[in-house]
Image (tube, coloured by chain):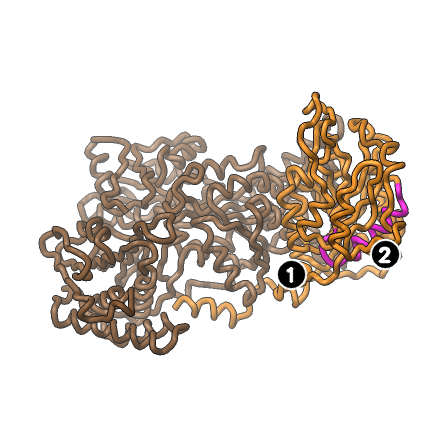
Amino acid sequence: MATTDVAAPKTMAMADFKGRVSPDWCPGCGDFGVLAAVQKALVELQIPNHQVATISGIGCSSNFPGFIETYGMHTLHGRSLAVATGFKMANHGMTVLVTGGDGDGFGIGGNHFIHTMRRNVDLTYIVMDNQIYGLTTGQTSPTSRLGMKTKSMPFGSVEAPINPISLALAAGATFVARGFSAEQKHLTELLKQAIEHKGFAFLDVFSPCVTYNHDNTFQWFRPRVKKLEENPGYDSTDWVMAMEKSTLWGDEIPIGKFFERTDVPTLHGSEPVLNAGPLVHQDIRLPKDVAQSFIDELM
Amino acid sequence: MRQSFAVGIGGAAGQGVATPGDIFAKVFSRRGLHLNAYNAYQSIIRGGHTFLTIRTGPEKISNMGDHLDLLIPLNQDTMDRHLSLLTAGGACLYNSDLIKPGAAAAGVQLCPIPVSELADISKNKVAQNTLAIGAALSMMGIGFPALESVLAEQFRKKPQAVIDENVNLARAGYDYASQHFKPFAWPLPMTEMKYAVLSGNGALAMGGAAAGVKFYSAYPMSPSTGVLHWFAEHARKAEIMVRQVEDEIGVINMAIGAAHAGVRAMCATSGGGFALMSEGLGLAAQAEIPIVVIDCQRAGPSTGVPTKTEQGDLWQMLGAAFGDYPRVIAAPLDIADCFKLIPEIFNIADRFQCPGIVLCDLLLSEGRLSVDPKEINFYPEIDRGELITSNGAPHEAYKRYKITESGVSPRAIPGIPGFTHVVSSDEHDEDGILISDEYTNVAKRRAMMEKRMRKVDGIAASVPPPQLSGPANADVTLIGWGSTYGVIDEACELLREAGISANHLPIRWLVPLHGDAILDLLKNAKHTIIVENNFSGQFARYLRSETSYVPNGHIRKYDGEPFMPHHIVEAVKEQLAGNTTLSVPTHEVMV
């Protein structure tokens, strides 16, 4: 179908990406910084807001699409990547951002996370990782540290956390990065690179929960995070080096771009069906000769 | 009585039952004969037992029938299990090197083929199959050239030597039979028609292509996998995006994403996969995104009997996903209807922005039916409903979930300047903004629920009420839904021949049901019986819940196999005699 664009080209400003409602996150929540960085990145890249789809799951950070003016889709807990894959396949002309939290992405959505990475779907997946379940009032998440006490594990977690960076590298993600909500400029730069990357871009962002996570706070992260970009010997095209760095956790926690490769075709680029342009703009009627050939096969 | 001829071919999986089946189907359909085929098989790749019935004749063949005219057992096991299905005038063609005949009914011709004398069995392990096909066609009175051309086509991807070898074998079988066996009393006629042979799964997929489906996603699950196979094979030609997904949760959510982007999206599964999809179905309902989901039912619960048929998922469909929302559920009546139904249900799903569910089953999905190619219309009416695809006209601030009298809010396709909005699985206001985080906004919740549910009336008005077929004042009225259509239709005919007038009320649209129209049709019925392929009478219970109607009796079957006409005829007789109100026919043949 034709989706005609008769609007004059317009310069995008921060106000164009301001959502109709103000975020209702707790004061001081890390997610505010992520929202601001995403809006800044889109403005700096000058992507028109109607060409952006922001798709989320369920959780505090998944309320994100309501706070940014784009084509938003607030889906089910853990299912955002599956919905986003279908969306991108039907209209690969649009920029697709997927937002959510660590429980949404690595817990209930873990299966979709792995498979979306191996498919190299061309989208940007931003996980606001606060290492806790916030909206359900503070339970252990897949990234909660071993020993962390929560309402669901009051005597301390006995389960080792997932390492999202190592997992993404192992699953074949073609862009893997980590940001910190308090490092606005750095995060904005990472987001711009992630959005421009042709393929699956994964961005794990430390976005501290000021209400329920008293272990991994802004204060805890600040002295620990070290930018990979400031390490002259670091080569983000080296997968082995990226894997090694991904295991660092403690006094030094690397943030920045761990890995990027550009030689893997995207899912939509691998499907000849899309050569004729986005699926949504294609004719839905079969050509007469094709329809006839389907009948001939049955005779 | 309809003239028909039924061939049964059985053996272990891997013995090559499918190929003779395909060859017979081609020979019959090109001769202008109708056919209906059903394969009873096990969930096993090699070994076990599989039995294919192909029934043919000059008029429509609606089911596999009650008996066989020709049995081709490829092993002893098949001979032992199925010989009793042959009645007087029938014949059994078997490899006399390996198989001992059993005790056949009077008038059944036992036809031993000395395979090792006619073929070099060290070179060709399926020589017995080809010899038997040749012999069978000779006895049916069909000229050899018809078979020769089908064989050449069947083995077209093989070297010429393979084609020649098979043609020679078939010829040897053909000649041997004409010298040694009696031809059938009823030589197969020929008509001017040429029929297409459709599988139910192929028909569902082609119906999707005709409806304009541009995105199909699936996870393999019997008996729905054939739909995926058709789409995968034809995707590039038809320009359809086909994805095999990690699980059925991903399947339905991908379809929803594609549908939201503006294309028609469909997926198919069986009961177990559908269970995983029900969460997604709720998202489609709440966000008002049209999708069509096909459930090819198999015997449940759980893994159940993966290769056997049942109509046991009705209540799963009625209750799928929590909360109240408008949905459409339809059950195709036969394989041709699998094709026709898909564009119809897509139009309703699109117009009312709600999920559509197609309740098929293994009997139709994996069965085959001859269809007049003129009935395969790839250009049906397409109605995509109230879509906004351009920002050409000036407009007010767009509200995705605008409150309207019909309950339908115009849907802007993402990508248009000036129409950015949020769709949501949370309850929302007209603007798509969540109200779940507001302090109990009762007015907005109520308004939005009523807006969605107003669509129910529009949906009902767009679906025709069911109709009775057969004489008005019948002794008995048989009520069925979906795939039992064909077998009930033939049972009615057999009952009329036995002096019992019978009519038939087939239900195709399950939601909306048109309960008042059904009550009106049934108010003068003398004796009503609901026939269904499940244990608890799922449709009977649904009809009662919607209309308070209680029939006089029930005929149910839940052994994994479909009804045969005589099961229904005998059950009707025992119920009219007052012997019971619930008949559960025994499937005589262990398949």
Q: Quadrant of residue A141?
A: top right
Residue B349 x, y percent position in the rendering: 57, 48
Which chain has been coloured orange in this picture? Answer: A
Q: Which of A47 and B538 is in front in this view?
A: A47
**Quadrant of the rendered image containing residue B376:** bottom left
In the image: residue A27, left or right of residue B553: right
Disc 2 marks which amino acid?
Gln
Left or right: B77 with respect to B276? Answer: left
Question: Residue tagged by mark 2?
Answer: A46
**Secondary structure of the magenta portion, mostly?**
helix
The structure residue drawn at horizontal position 43% and vertical position 48%, both measured from the top left corner, is B360
Tell me: A11 left or right of B213: right
Position of B335 relative to B539 (above/below): below
**Which chain is painted in brown?**
B
Q: Which amino acid does label 1 sit on?
A: Leu
Residue B572: name its quadrant. Answer: top left
Locate the N terminus of chain B and report the quarter of the image it occupies.
bottom left
- Other-residue count near label 2 (Cα within 10 Å), few / some / many at <14 / 14–19 / ≥20: few
Residue A210, above or below B214: above
Residue B200: x %, y % from top left: 41, 55
Question: Residue at point 76% right, 59% down?
Answer: B392
The segment highlighted magenta reads A183-201
Chain of the residue under label 1: A
**Disc 2 on helix, strand or loop?**
loop
State which chain disc 2 sits on: A
* Residue indicated by mark 1: A279
